[in-house]
Image (tube, coloured by chain):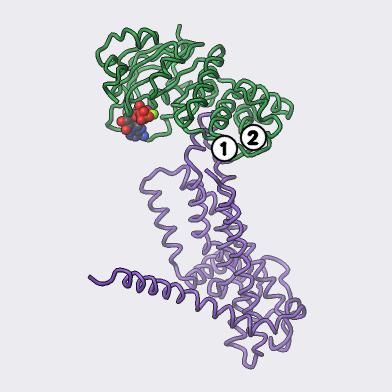
Chain colours: A green, B purple
Amino acid sequence: MPKIQTNGLGLWYGGFHALKNVNAGFEANKITAIIGPSGCGKSTLLRVFNRMNDLIEGVRIEGDVLIDGSNIFDMRTDLVTLREKVGMVFQRPNPFPLSIYENIVFGVRVHNGRVKRDKLDEAVEQSLKSVLLWDELKDRLDKPALRLSLEQKQRLCIARLIAVRPDVLLMDEPCSTLDPQATARIEELMRELKASYTIIIVTHNMQQAARVSDDTGFMLLGELIEFGRTEAIFTAPRDKRTEDYITGRYG
Amino acid sequence: MRNPHRTQKIAFFLLLLATLLIVVPVGLIVVIIIQKGLPGISWQFLSDIPRQGMRAGGIFPAIVGTVYLVTGAIVFALPIGLLAAIYLSEYSKDNFLTRLIKLAIVNLAGVPSVVYGLFGLALFVVFFKLGASILAGSLTLGIMILPIIITSSREALESVPYTFREVSLSLGASKWQTIRHIVLPNAIPGVLTGTILGLGRAAGETAPILFTVAAFYLPFLPKSVFDQAMALPYHLYVISTQVPNVDEKIRYGTAFVLLALVLFMNLVAIIIRYQFRKKKKW
Ligand SMILES: Nc1ncnc2c1ncn2[C@@H]1O[C@H](COP(=O)(O)OP(=O)(O)OP(=O)(O)O)[C@@H](O)[C@H]1O
Ligand SMILES: [Mg+2]
């Protein structure tokens, strides 16, 4: 059973139909890339999975999204638990204007209330280690996170998320502000992380999708045109529109 | 075509002149008050009660009264103003009620201060039977500075980037946790700035305290919030217009103390804002 399954998922921003009948299964311990031209609904789809669209007025959703078999739109679904399980990394690295340490423990505190100092220290060490920042930062955990480099900031944001112990990492163009070297290192990190997480990444960069992902979905104007193994999508797309996009005929 | 350089120069000159016209009166007021007031300032003037029908002695009870009033106004207006600002900027939807509240705040800011005085008299002094008292005066001043506090707090809250809230919520924080731990700490300097500007305003106004608290002459300190008190602006009014033959040194000395108090508060507000600007980098 896929970790996340969407059945006939549709979404409207007021009168605008942004997602149309999306059916897809996102497997655990795999990286699934979502590609497509600007405005096709990639971010919208991603934000469905942790219900961030709830914040926007006038959003209407139909269909089901099952995570571990339970519908996230169910009345019984607790938003806090859902977001603890399904975390998000944003396009622009966005650490809080706090110290490195405080950034990482924020989520831990939110979910566990008052936590002992050594537990927090442990969470900080573990999450920084898993994003390969521990050696660089262990001596300046009390320094403001805003002073880090862009790449370090983005890694810190991933660490902040990992500290909450989610199952699913949603990444919305996490490398779009980074240079190619930093991008390559973040991609390396994603490959390491997929052993423990379900990763869904939105990207504009087809090479990136081809490099890191196991599965790929191609979207166009709110529709999921094609979804399948990444090699299959890139070498033998079944739909003409997918082929056109991959060969660069859409921009 | 005229020479564009000359037109530019003339325009520049006119703009400079307009700016100077703003600076000059402020400078003049400060200079005159300092020149005439400073010689009257002494430890005795600041710490003694008024004597000989306010023609001698000091202004200590008026200073204390003003401090009490301003403190009271803040204790009342800051929590209400901040909570209202949080409601308006974080919770309210754009509907009829919200627009009504916002309209009320704008209008509240435009009400002449003497009207606040009459309102305070009718509501607190007479209706709630508080009598002319520090409590009644503080409440009246508090209502007067509410719009300042609400408006500046709202601006401070709204200047906290939306992405911080988004991230916090996406990490599973509740709305209140997000406000409490992410939004508020980043808005505090702005809130403080507005509060201090409100304080300065409350310290300097005469009309709102005229009927609600101010004592003409009370040569001892108030013992409780239900007592009347002297206050600097009203004392200044009294010794300038109501009591004949008060020495200029005493009048300008009082004005100097009042001005120094207000300018000092504004200075603190400016420093806080400056420090905050220097630190914030998003
Ligand atoms: N809050 C909103 N209200 C109304 N329409 C919206 C809103 N957010 C997005 N849209 C519209 O929905 C469509 C999909 O937006 P979305 O952000 O999901 O696209 P995207 O594929 O992520 O694009 P990009 O690659 O530029 O990030 C766009 O046409 C956009 O204009
Ligand atoms: Mg997007």
Badge 1: few (under 14), some or many (20 or more) residues near its Cα, within 10 Å? many
Amino acid type, label 2:
Glu
| Quadrant position of residue A148 | top right
Residue A231, placed above or below residue B122: above
For residue A59, say whether it is visible.
no
- Residue placed most toward the observer, B60 or A224: A224
Quick one: label 2 or label 1, which is nearer the N terminus?
A: 1
To which residue does mark 1 refer?
Answer: A96
Q: Quadrant of ligand 2?
A: top left
The subunit carrying tag 1 is: A
Q: Confirm or reject: label 2 Cβ below 8 Å from ligand 2.
A: no
| Quadrant position of residue A235 | top left
Badge 2: few (under 14), some or many (20 or more) residues near its Cα, within 10 Å? many
Q: In this view, which residue lies farthest toward the bottom?
A: B245
To which residue does mark 2 refer?
Answer: A102
Residue A233, placed above or below residue A108: above
Labels 2 & 1 near each other (Cβ < 8 A): yes
Q: x%, y% of residue B206? A: 56, 75
The residue under the point 62% across, 79% down is B255
Q: x%, y% of residue B191? A: 56, 53
- Residue placed most toward the observer, A184 or A131: A184
Query: What is the CA distance from the residue labelled 2 to the residue labelled 1?
Result: 9 Å
Amino acid type, label 1:
Phe
Q: x%, y% of residue A177? A: 46, 32
Left or right, A98 with reference to B50: left
The residue under the point 55% across, 53% down is B190
